[in-house]
Image (cartoon, grey):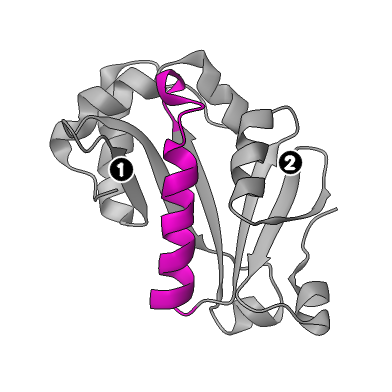
Amino acid sequence: MRGWRRGDVGDLYEYAKNPSMAMGGWKPLKNVFQARRTLKSFIKEDDRWAIALKENGKVIGQLRLRIEKNRGQFSERNSAYTINYALSEAYWGKGYMTEAVKRVITYAFDEMNIEILGVFTTHHNTRSKRVIERCGFQYEGENERFACYSILRRRGENDAQAASQCG
């Protein structure tokens, strides 16, 4: 994983134009102009990493870590974050996303000292659910659009009750 670069626009467009992106709740990109605008916002917001192949630097996906404001006491302490991600369909089922999410979990807990990470996925996205479960997230519930999961740095009875924001 690495920061986004202006030269990544072609790789971003290549994977993000695929209609399969809708499975993760993304709207597929329609053209290179839209990819440029999207990339510009990725760079400006600076809360998202490019997932790039080690051997050639080709960007195959992205992972975002952003503050979560609906987690009660955790949010009050700025200690709640949400992960979301997307990966090129050509690389599904190869372990790239599981590896990336595990690295971000370690970074979030060990470097940022946050207390809780949440993640959401659409109900029909079974591949994403497998990544989430492999990474140790616990099912919280669901609403009309998403299944909700979280992982706590430490588990306690009061923390688990205060953490849930879904369904």
Could you tell me which residue is drawn at 33 percent across and 55 percent down?
45
Is 68 on the left-hand or right-hand side of 45? Answer: right
* Residue 55, x across and y down, in percent: 18, 33
Up/down of 128 relative to 140, above or below: above
User: Circle 2: is it few (<14), some (14-19), or many (20+) Cα within 10 Å?
Assistant: some
- The residue tagged 2 is 146
Under tag 1, what secondary structure? Answer: strand
Could you tell me which residue is drawn at 52 percent across and 76 percent down?
114
Is 38 on the left-hand or right-hand side of 151? Answer: left
Under tag 2, what secondary structure? Answer: strand
Which of marks 1 and 2 precedes in the sequence? 1
Contact? badges 2 and 1 (CB < 8 Å): no
Is 105 within the magenta?
Answer: yes
Up/down of 121 relative to 150, above or below: above
Give the amino acid type for the residue marked by disc 1 in the picture.
Ala
User: Circle 1: is it few (<14), some (14-19), or many (20+) Cα within 10 Å?
Assistant: many
* Residue 61, x across and y down, in percent: 37, 34
Is 115 within the magenta?
Answer: no
Q: Which residues are magenta?
A: 87-113
- The residue tagged 1 is 50
Could you tell me which residue is drawn at 61 percent across and 76 percent down?
75
Q: How many marks?
A: 2
